[in-house]
Image (spheres, rainbow, N blue to C red):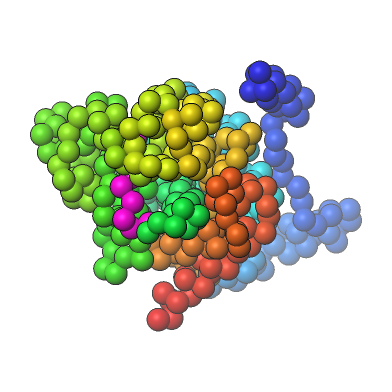
Amino acid sequence: MAGKNYYEESLELHRKNKGKIEVRSKIPVNTIADLSTVYSPGVAAPCLAIHENPDDVYTYTIKSNTVALVSDGSAVLGLGNIGAAAAIPVMEGKCMLFKKFADLDAFPICLDTQDTEQIIQTVRNIAPVFGGINLEDISAPRCFEIESRLQDLGIPVFHDDQHGTAIVTLAALINAAKVLGRDLNDLKIVINGAGSAGIAIAKLLRGFGQKNPKVAVKHIILCDRKGILCKNRADIAGILHKMEALLYTNPESKHGTVFDALVGADVFIGVSQSGLLMAEHIRSMAKDPIVLAMANPEPEIMPDEAFKGGAAIFGTGRSDFPNQVNNVLGFPGIFRGAMDARAPRITTDMKLAAAFAIAKYLKNPDREHIIPAALDKKVASAVARAVYKAAMKEKNP
């Protein structure tokens, strides 16, 4: 099994290298003159310059090009709450992707606490060093509050599990609808998984909270482990993010299981559990459905089973199948563009700009190519330009 080999090879790679990233100096220190310039006494000059003009921190330090990758290890990939130390390999990997695709220096900050207040205060305390904060693998609902309360830092704070996933999913749907000759806003969409990713996808697709939404899908049903989120679900009372979801999903007040929701639906988006669906469930959907099964490490349904059920377009989060819906297409360029623009936060217009840039990057999408290849470095540049443009437009309307 290919996956088995990846696991074994990954263990050996990490064992051999003792991790995947390191810190290197930009300037050699070979002489006393070098030492006197990079450290005492010369280093006093940039320190005093920043003290006199705090904005000079972007001129004289690593801040303008450095991202903190902050996690508490509570929702790591499909592995669950494995803790801060066990999350480090994932965070190191993401730091590598920041460097490869956007030439941004990122560092894993894995916190040995899952207390909301402690996480917020810790991020505030370390923020002077960083030009952006990428929140990662923090479980819902705490992730919503943590991100929201950090929006006043004056630098982009972005929970990628929410918005990165939503942005790349929207890009895939834009092209899938185009390939099938359908209007995106008229598609009937079922999202399974009402955690951080599912909530963010639903909000972005519906245009919730936007004055003049560029995307406004009319029919979205959101499901969790117990079925469709609906008004007669007493068990969601008091769960704020699920109660709020009723404002922008399930307009017909349907109830039942995810399988009930799928009947007649045009699109299934899975950010939930492996092995959830079978061909018979895809057959119950509308003709030529779009299936984006993104559970990790195994999708909600495998491609052969989905196509057996009549899927017209199929995508996963995996690199060994066509149409990989992967956040790497989004977050490097999003941070590059936002940080280059010195944007104080990442707004909805910037997210939409990123989604449309990813979609438009493919000149001639087809059923097996609704989204660019994850390793195409030019995508990040296209996203960065679009996000930068959107950010500057907001700063100078």
Position of 110 with respect to 153 (left or right) is right
Residue at (71%, 44%) from the top-left corner?
Answer: 23
Please indicate whether residue 288 sits to the left or right of residue 51 in the image: left
Specify the quadrant that holds the C terminus: bottom left
Give x and y (percent) for residue 125. Answer: 45, 49
Which quadrant of the view contains residue 395? Answer: bottom left
- Residue 329 visible in the shown view: no
- The residue located at (29%, 64%) in the rendering is 210
Would residue 381 appear left or right of 301 to someone viewing this image?
right
Q: Is residue 82 visible?
A: yes
Q: Position of residue 22 (x, y in %)?
A: 72, 41
Q: Position of residue 277 (x, y in %)?
A: 40, 26
The correct choice, above or below, for 247 with respect to 56 in the image is: above
Question: How many labels, in total?
Answer: 0
Q: Which residues are magenta?
A: 184-194
Judging depth in this view, the residue of 39 and 27 nearest the camera is 27
Nearest to the observer: residue 333 or residue 319: 319
State whether residue 348 is above or below residue 280: below
Is residue 271 rendered magenta in the image?
A: no
Coordinates of residue 345 in the picture (x, y in percent): 42, 62
Work out which residue is located at the far bottom of the displayed protein and give it.
397
In this view, 307 is above or below 209: above
The quadrant holding residue 339 is bottom right
Q: Residue furthest right?
A: 31
85 on left or right of 255: right
Q: Quadrant of the N terminus?
A: top right
Q: Does the segment drawn in magenta span residue 192? A: yes
Q: Residue at horizontal 41%, vertical 45%?
A: 162
From the viewer's side, name the closer residue of 310 and 163: 310
What residue sits 31% from the left and 56% below the top? 186
